[in-house]
Image: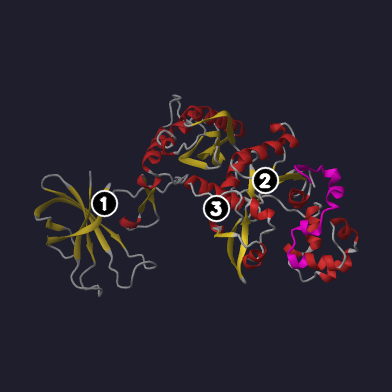
């Protein structure tokens, strides 16, 4: 163990409290004295998924069969639960819990796990931190049992089987978990029953048994159901890291508000300045920023913006949220705002121009960012070079937010700036079969050829084209009015790949 502090939050009545809150909002909540359970389908009929206080006092327990519990309580009311909805709500709560620390995730169907290493001093110590967490969850209508310990396994066990708001220092870990039952090792019911039959009812009993005998007995057990592996995880001998619901970037700025507000706009500029200060210190820029607002009712709303070039300019980053903050539903208000920098890349200060003026490419990047933020990343495109001699394959339109290559391929020489999406077939009059045209008809216009240059022969790409594809001879043509066109002849006479050659107009010169 290396000084880690893990908080386990056990939510024993999460499913029922969520259901009761929804029913109260609809005005359909049953009286408190009516015993009611939530049920889900089990292997042998419906089983209890959640119980209210009256049902709990009547002896109803989660996991028991509904038919057996009705024998004990004939007045029992049964409503089918929604485990998928409960799981989604718990995922949202895990995001909401990031107000206390950077790393949080769900732990089973009714728990959260948080890595609060280095975060407790921001809330007045671990005892005050647990009280604050409990109060914040209670404000959402969620009852919780909490504990903090050096390992995930120890925190999980103390939250469910230890004292209220248990705080376990690293040096007291062995003594703190010794009196806990073996069920606190996160083992299956069959394994717990087997340990009881062996006379091992507490963690201390299991720790005193020679490991060799237990290793032989549980050699075929899975890692998640092996008491020795679970014991080593609890005692910190086996690593069990807490990975958050998302890999949070290292650069972030946060604002905790004394009172809930409805509009985060006044805080965005300051948050951008904070993260840009950190980015400047690290010599990095970001390719995106993400703003999260934490609502007082447990919801988390997020808006994000991307950049086409690494940036650490506060005004530019703040401007990307200009039309996005209106999309946030304020609800009952939010009391915490978080801004995160994403896609960090090295960005050193460099003077590009001798006159010290702004770089033109950077101005273009800012324009692309603003347009993409307002219209969407897919709405703004740019041409990107491709390795091909065929004009229609030499470039492709990609999102303007994609990173430009450091050394872009040089554009082909003497090619028109404007190409038709599909070459248009033309009728040509020529004197020599393999020579230039004398006149051609395009879009019902007869054009006389005054000057020409070429041909430029382009062979088929045999590794991509179908067999029988004909070569092309391109000509630069100027008509009698001075307009310049790019034509090509597809195929040659008697090349054995088709009938007479066909002519196409592929582009126009400026």
Instruction: Return the residue at label 1.
Output: 419
Left or right of 200: which side holds 90? left
The answer to whether residue 119 of the structure is visible from this angle is: no
Whole-Å distance between the Cαs marked 2 and 3? 18 Å
Going from N to C along the chain, the mark reached first, 1 or 3, is: 3
Q: Nearer the viewer, residue 228 or 486?
A: 228
- In the picture shown, does residue 473 fall above or below 264? below
Give the residue at the far bottom of this rendering: 496
SS category of the residue bearing label 1: strand
For the C terminus, the quadrant is: top left
Q: What x and y, as percent, mark residue 417?
A: 28, 46
Task: State which region is magenta.
Answer: 163-191
Whole-Å distance between the Cαs marked 1 and 3? 51 Å
Task: Tell me whether circle 1 and circle 2 mark residues in contact (CB < 8 Å).
Answer: no
142 inside magenta stretch: no
Instruction: Return the residue at label 2.
Output: 144
How was this image coloured? secondary structure
Q: Which mark is residue 88?
A: 3
Residue located 14% across and 44% down the image:
482
Residue located 79% across and 60% down the image:
229
């Amino acid at each position: 163990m290396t000084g880690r502090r893990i908080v386990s939050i056990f939510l024993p009545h999460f499913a029922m409290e969520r259901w009761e809150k929804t029913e109260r909002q609809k005005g359909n909540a049953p009286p408190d004295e009516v015993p009611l359970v939530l049920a889900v389908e089990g292997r042998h009929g419906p089983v209890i998924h959640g119980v209210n206080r009256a049902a709990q006092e009547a002896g109803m327990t989660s996991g028991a069969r509904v038919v057996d519990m009705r024998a004990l309580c004939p007045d029992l009311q049964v409503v089918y639960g929604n485990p998928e909805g409960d799981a989604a709500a718990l995922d949202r709560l895990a995001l909401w819990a990031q107000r206390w620390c950077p790393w949080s995730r769900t732990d089973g169907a009714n728990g959260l796990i948080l890595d609060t290493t280095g975060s407790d001093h921001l809330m007045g110590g671990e005892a005050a931190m647990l009280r604050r967490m409990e109060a914040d969850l209670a404000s959402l209508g969620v009852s919780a049992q909490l504990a903090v310990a050096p390992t995930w396994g120890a925190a999980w066990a103390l939250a469910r089987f230890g004292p209220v708001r248990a705080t376990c220092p690293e040096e007291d870990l062995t003594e703190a978990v010794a009196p806990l039952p073996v069920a606190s090792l996160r083992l299956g019911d069959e394994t717990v029953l087997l340990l009881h039959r062996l006379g091992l009812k507490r963690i201390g009993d299991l720790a005193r048994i020679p490991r060799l005998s237990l290793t032989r007995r549980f050699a075929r057990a899975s890692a998640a159901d092996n008491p020795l592996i679970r014991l080593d995880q609890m005692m910190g001998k086996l690593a069990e890291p807490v990975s958050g619901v998302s890999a949070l970037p290292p650069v972030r700025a946060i604002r905790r508000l004394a009172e809930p507000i409805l509009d985060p706009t006044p805080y965005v500029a300051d948050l951008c300045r904070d993260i840009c200060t950190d980015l400047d210190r690290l010599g990095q820029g970001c390719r995106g920023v993400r703003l999260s607002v934490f609502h007082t009712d447990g919801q988390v709303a997020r808006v994000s913006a991307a950049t086409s070039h690494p940036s650490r300019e506060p005004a530019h980053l703040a401007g990307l949220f200009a039309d996005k903050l209106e999309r946030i539903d304020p609800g009952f208000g939010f009391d915490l705002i978080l801004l995160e920098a994403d896609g960090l890349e090295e960005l050193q200060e460099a003077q590009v121009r001798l006159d010290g003026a702004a770089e033109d490419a950077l101005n273009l990047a800012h324009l692309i960012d603003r347009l993409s933020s307002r219209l969407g990343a897919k709405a703004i495109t740019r041409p990107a070079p491709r390795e091909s001699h065929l004009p229609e394959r030499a470039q492709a339109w990609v999102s303007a937010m994609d990173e430009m290559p450091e050394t872009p391929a040089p554009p082909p020489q003497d090619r028109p700036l404007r190409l038709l999406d599909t070459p248009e077939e033309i009728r040509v009059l020529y004197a020599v079969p393999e020579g230039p045209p004398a006149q051609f008809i395009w879009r019902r216009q007869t054009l006389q050829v005054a000057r020409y240059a070429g041909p430029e022969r382009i062979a088929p790409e045999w590794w991509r084209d179908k067999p029988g594809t004909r070569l092309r001879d391109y000509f630069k043509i100027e008509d009698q009015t001075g307009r310049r066109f790019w034509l090509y002849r597809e195929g040659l006479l008697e090349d054995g790949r088709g009938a007479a050659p066909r002519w196409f107009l592929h582009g126009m010169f400026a």
